[in-house]
């Protein structure tokens, strides 16, 4: 059986991990756990190809721990039973579980008591946010670590290691071709390894050039200044174009992001824009963005481009207001400066002195809600960029007049 290059290159100790230095760098948490010969259950989450499996395998290999690799979807309840019996036989077992967010209730019920007792140490892996997708009973028994996206330099480092590893004999490749593969991979190291291996075996002389790579993958590549974070520059340009109400620029940067097929980044950035930059000027944009994201998830590419183009143009041409965001910033600044005090007694839980607004005309009664030392604080300053917030301003100012 010919193992893929990505598996042949899988690290055997955490110091060989590419990227993720916030977890496996010198004196960082996973490094220190390994150095102290102690492992706790954990969940590793992040995008595909950025090192979740590599970290899990490196930990158990370096610590020489008995382990089994399971997939929450592929492996059935019988497979789980076998692993638990092995754990009982050997006095413990590390279970490395891919797609843990898709583990069904039967498997969870089987695993939980042994996870609780410590017989099973779990290293779960997922591309989904565990706070949304993983059963709280599992989640509460695990330390959660978020993996960061790999930079182009990380991918280049991995490709150079692959070239010098000896697994691809007589390979010849220059720096421009390595950089081209790195750009194609969009931060997915496994994808970069796969591209390198396929191009290598597609040549007759093992000489890899950009033309040879294009014969395998013709997707356009956008090169960025090596000293700049091109990915985040592109997302920044996308948001600032929308914030600046330039629909043409917004669509252009959307097109560049789509050429990289980076839907997750587009989704996150649009959601931020809807609430940070548009906010109370057009509150309907938040649900509209969510609806567009749901439509894109159902459609997939290339059709997902259509709802994205609609919602991005509407975001760009929508009135803008960051007043809600600034209100929270103002309140947060007061708290961080120590301007905090006891909650007024009449609005504490089960207080008999609380005045219930629904019992009064127009659903309002004058009452103090802020602590005494902040009772005159003002955090929200309305903007008048839209009729919606103009109406909110009128209500807001009329309420203040009654105080």
Image: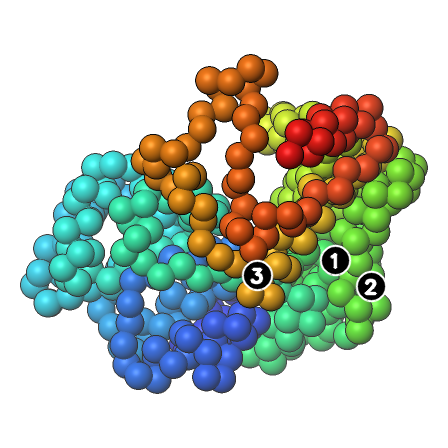
On screen, residue 256 versus residue 98, left or right, reads: right
Circle 3 crowding by C-alpha within 10 Å: few under 14, some 14–19, many from 20:
few
Marks 3/2: CA–CA distance:
45 Å
Which of 237 and 195 lies nearest the eye of the viewer? 237
Mark 3 highlights which residue?
339
What's the mark number on residue 355? none
Element type where label 2 sits in the image: loop
Where is residue 44, by image quadrant? bottom left
Where does the C terminus fall, quadrant-wise? top right
| Residue occupying image coordinates x 62% and y 52% | 331
In-image side of 49 versus 196 (left or right): left
**For mark 2, what is the residue?**
224
The residue sitting at 34% across, 77% down in the picture is 33
On residue 231, the disc is: 1
Please state the horizontal and vertical placement of residue 327, each as a whole percent of the image. Answer: 68, 47
- Which one is nearer the viewer's eye here, 290 or 51? 290
| Picture coordinates of residue 154, whole percent (x, y) | 64, 71
**Sooner in the amino-acid sequence: mark 1 or mark 3:** 1
Which one is in front, 15 or 390? 390
Among numbered discs 3 and 2, the one appearing first in the sequence = 2
Q: Residue 137, percent across and down?
A: 27, 46
User: Which quadrant is home to the N terminus?
Assistant: bottom left
Q: How crowded is mark 1: few (under 14 residues within 10 Å), some or many (20 or more)?
A: some
């Amino acid at each position: 059986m010919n193992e893929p290059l990505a598996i042949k290159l899988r690290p055997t100790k955490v110091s060989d991990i590419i990227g993720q230095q916030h977890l496996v760098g010198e004196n960082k948490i996973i490094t220190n756990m390994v150095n102290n010969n102690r492992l706790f259950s954990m969940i590793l989450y992040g995008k595909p190809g950025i090192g979740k499996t590599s970290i899990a395998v490196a930990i158990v290999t370096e610590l020489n721990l008995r382990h089994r690799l399971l997939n929450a979807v592929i492996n059935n309840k019988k497979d789980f039973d076998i692993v638990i019996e092995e754990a009982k036989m050997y006095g413990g077992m590390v279970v490395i579980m891919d797609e843990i967010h898709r583990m069904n209730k039967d498997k969870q019920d089987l695993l939980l008591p042994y996870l609780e007792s410590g017989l099973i140490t779990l290293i779960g892996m997922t591309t989904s946010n565990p706070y949304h997708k993983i059963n709280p009973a599992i989640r509460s028994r695990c330390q959660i670590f978020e993996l960061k996206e790999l930079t182009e330099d990380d991918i280049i480092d991995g490709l150079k290691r692959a070239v010098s590893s000896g697994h691809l004999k007589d390979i010849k490749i220059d720096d421009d071709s390595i950089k081209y593969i790195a750009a194609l991979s969009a931060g997915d190291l496994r994808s970069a390894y796969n591209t390198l291996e396929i191009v290598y075996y597609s040549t007759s002389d093992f000489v890899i050039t950009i033309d040879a790579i294009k014969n395998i993958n013709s997707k356009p590549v956008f090169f960025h200044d090596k000293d700049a974070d091109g990915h985040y520059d592109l997302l920044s340009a996308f948001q600032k174009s929308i914030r600046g109400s330039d629909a043409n620029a917004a669509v252009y940067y959307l097109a560049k992001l789509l050429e990289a097929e980076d839907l997750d980044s587009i989704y996150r950035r649009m959601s931020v824009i809807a609430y940070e930059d548009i906010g109370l000027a057009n509150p309907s944009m938040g649900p509209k963005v969510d609806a567009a994201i749901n439509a894109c998830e159902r459609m997939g590419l290339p059709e997902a481009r259509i709802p994205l183009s609609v919602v991005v143009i509407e975001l760009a041409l929508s009135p803008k207001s960051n007043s809600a965001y600034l209100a929270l910033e103002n309140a947060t600044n007061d708290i961080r400066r120590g301007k905090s005090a006891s909650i007024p007694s009449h609005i504490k839980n089960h207080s008999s002195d609380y005045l219930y607004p629904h019992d009064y005309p127009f659903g309002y009664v004058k009452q103090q809600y802020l602590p005494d030392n902040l009772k005159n604080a003002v955090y929200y300053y309305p903007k008048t960029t839209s009729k919606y917030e103009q109406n909110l301003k009128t209500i807001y100012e009329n309420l203040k007049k009654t105080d």
